[in-house]
């Protein structure tokens, strides 16, 4: 509702009279009671967000001002977007604003906190800059908890500006106390910036504001506590997970500069989280600062060389390669990773790589209701078959890369599981490539899967039977015909699948129904 338009309409006697006449007619027709605007209670007006009407009522009926309480004021401050209305309220009910204590605690700072909660920045700015509301740590923490970074930065900067102005005024009054005033000023700023749970610094990192991050670190009154927080491995992991590919690398570089290689010791977990969530530039930064990583992996064949070899064993970890090849499925990541660690040209490193990948298997938590257990670890398959099972668009490119690479192709073996998982996940692009370039084919499970999902997998089934018929026993084909109505009850489909059986095993149409054998499920 536009306040000026509202005032013009109801200030016009003719229009006001016509409106009231229509209200009376509506009352009579609907047999209901519609109140005139001046009959409405203040609480109803505020709860229905008629703030322009509130101003008008308080003006023409001063006796109703006592109905306007602090609780109603909170709602106005939370939802009202007009500075003019706020100014008028201050003139009409000055006692409510005079009785508001400067913001120091939650219980006496509801006016500003209610505006913060609703992100009503326009009102917040006016309350602070014009009415002189003071800021303290609870209000700052409240903003951080709602992750309103724009408002948080404004509150920190405006508080510093106001403190500087107060300090300059004090300096003009008493130059002898200049140093004391500066110390007090710094203390006030630090009290707002530094908080025990590091909410503020985490919020700044999340929004990738390096310059402000650096400023907060420099202004902190407890740098040691802050450094202890930043050097924690969980802090690094949280930063990588929160910011992902958009992480400002200057923040990580600045943290590295704060510590030497004895103070900061990271583990493989940071590398893994970077591979999962971070950017290639972040991975490069970690690999260029290997001295910040401790040798926490089980060494084995990685010993003997220079100092850098002991650190590389942290990076030559099965989980790193699992995420590089399967979950991240990024050839550029994998190429850089192997080149930077010199895995192919150094015999010791290559042997360590072979040992790492040799027994690499992918496990998944699968439900096992038949045995009465909730969960058990079940193997999905080797790396290649798991890449096929994943729905990453780059899966085919990764399989082609590993199968053609000079060094990787000797570390991986294609099995029937690869085509099986390509069928299970509907990856026709991978299936077609395997048919044209590989001879392993699929297993009984893949064949049975195609039969159970006819006619969707008609093309795949025909291709498998034509090229990989030798992979399946006669029993598998017979079982597929008898257990699937698509083949059992349709003569054409029955004869097609039966044509791949020897003459002595062919069954007359229609076959009797049987239950599919469990090993083919």
Image: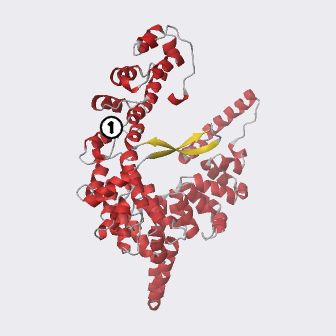
Q: Residue at x 41, y 69 (%)?
A: 265
> Which residue occupies the foreground of this view, 231 or 184?
231
Query: Is 292 above or below relative to 280?
Result: below
| The image quarter in which residue 347 lies | bottom left
Residue 422 coordinates in the image, percent (x, y): 40, 33
> Which residue occupies the foreground of this view, 63 or 398?
398
Give the quadrant of the N terminus: top right
Q: Is residue 383 visible?
A: yes
Q: Residue at x 31, y 31 (%)?
A: 439
> Which residue occupies the foreground of this view, 123 or 316?
316
| Residue 264 located left or right of residue 54 | left
The residue where tag 1 is placed is: 396
Residue 433 coordinates in the image, percent (x, y): 30, 31
| The image quarter in which residue 205 lies | bottom left
Residue 88 coordinates in the image, percent (x, y): 58, 58
SS assignment at label 1: helix
Query: Is 116 above or below relative to 9?
Result: below
| The image quarter in which residue 418 lies | top left
Q: Is residue 90 visible?
A: no
Q: What is the residue that sits farthest to the bottom in this orientation?
A: 176
Residue 240 coordinates in the image, percent (x, y): 42, 58
Q: Residue at x 47, y 8 (%)?
A: 491
**What is the total number of numbered labels drawn onto the structure image?**
1
Query: Is 339 above or below relative to 251?
Result: above
> Which colour style is shown?
secondary structure
Q: Residues within 10 Å of mark 1 (few under 14, many from 20)?
A: some
């Amino acid at each position: 509702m536009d306040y000026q338009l509202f005032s013009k309409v109801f200030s016009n006697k003719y229009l006001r009279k016509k409106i009231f006449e229509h209200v009376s007619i509506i009352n009579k027709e609907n047999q209901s009671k519609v109140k005139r605007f001046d009959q409405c209670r203040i609480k109803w007006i505020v709860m229905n967000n008629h703030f322009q009407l509130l101003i008008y009522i308080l003006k023409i009926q001063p006796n109703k001002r006592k109905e306007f309480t602090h609780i109603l004021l909170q709602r106005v401050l939370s939802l009202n977007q007009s500075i003019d209305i706020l100014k008028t309220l201050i003139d009409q009910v000055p006692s409510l604003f005079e009785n508001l204590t400067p913001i120091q605690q939650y219980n006496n700072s509801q006016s500003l906190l209610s505006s913060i909660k609703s992100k009503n920045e326009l009102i917040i700015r006016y309350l602070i800059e014009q009415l002189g509301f003071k800021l303290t740590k609870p209000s700052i923490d409240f903003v951080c908890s709602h992750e309103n970074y724009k408002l948080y930065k404004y509150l920190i900067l405006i508080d510093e500006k106001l403190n500087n102005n107060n300090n300059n005024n004090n300096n003009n009054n008493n130059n002898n106390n200049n140093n004391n005033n500066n110390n007090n000023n710094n203390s006030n700023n630090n009290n707002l910036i530094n908080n025990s749970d590091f909410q503020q610094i985490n919020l700044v990192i999340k929004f990738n504001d390096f310059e402000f991050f650096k400023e907060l670190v420099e202004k902190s009154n407890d740098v040691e506590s802050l450094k202890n927080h930043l050097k924690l491995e969980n802090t690094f992991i949280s930063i990588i997970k929160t910011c992902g590919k958009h992480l400002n690398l200057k923040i990580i570089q600045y943290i590295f500069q704060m510590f030497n290689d004895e103070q900061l010791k990271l583990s493989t977990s940071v590398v893994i989280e970077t591979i999962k969530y971070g950017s290639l530039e972040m991975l490069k930064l970690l690999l260029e600062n290997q001295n910040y990583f401790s040798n926490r992996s089980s060494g084995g064949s990685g010993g003997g060389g220079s100092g850098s070899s002991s650190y590389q064993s942290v990076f030559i970890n099965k989980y790193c390669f699992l995420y590089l090849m399967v979950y991240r499925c990024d050839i550029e990541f994998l190429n850089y990773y192997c080149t930077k660690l010199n895995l192919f040209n150094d015999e010791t490193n290559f042997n360590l790589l072979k040992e790492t990948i040799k027994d690499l298997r992918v496990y998944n938590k699968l439900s096992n209701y038949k045995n009465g257990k909730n969960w058990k670890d079940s193997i999905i398959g080797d790396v290649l078959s798991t890449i096929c099972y994943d729905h990453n668009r780059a899966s085919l490119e990764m399989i082609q890369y590993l199968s053609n690479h000079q060094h990787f192709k000797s570390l991986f073996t294609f099995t029937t599981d690869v085509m099986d998982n390509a069928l299970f996940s509907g990856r026709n692009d991978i299936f077609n490539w395997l048919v044209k370039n590989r001879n392993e084919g699929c297993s009984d499970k893949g064949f049975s899967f195609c039969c159970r999902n006819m006619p969707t997998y008609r093309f795949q089934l025909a291709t498998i039977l034509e090229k990989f018929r030798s992979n399946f026993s006669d029993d598998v084909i017979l079982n597929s015909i008898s257990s699937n109505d698509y083949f059992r009850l349709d003569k054409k489909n029955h004869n097609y699948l039966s044509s791949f059986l020897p003459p002595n095993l062919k069954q007359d149409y229609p076959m009797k129904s049987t239950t599919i054998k469990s090993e083919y499920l």
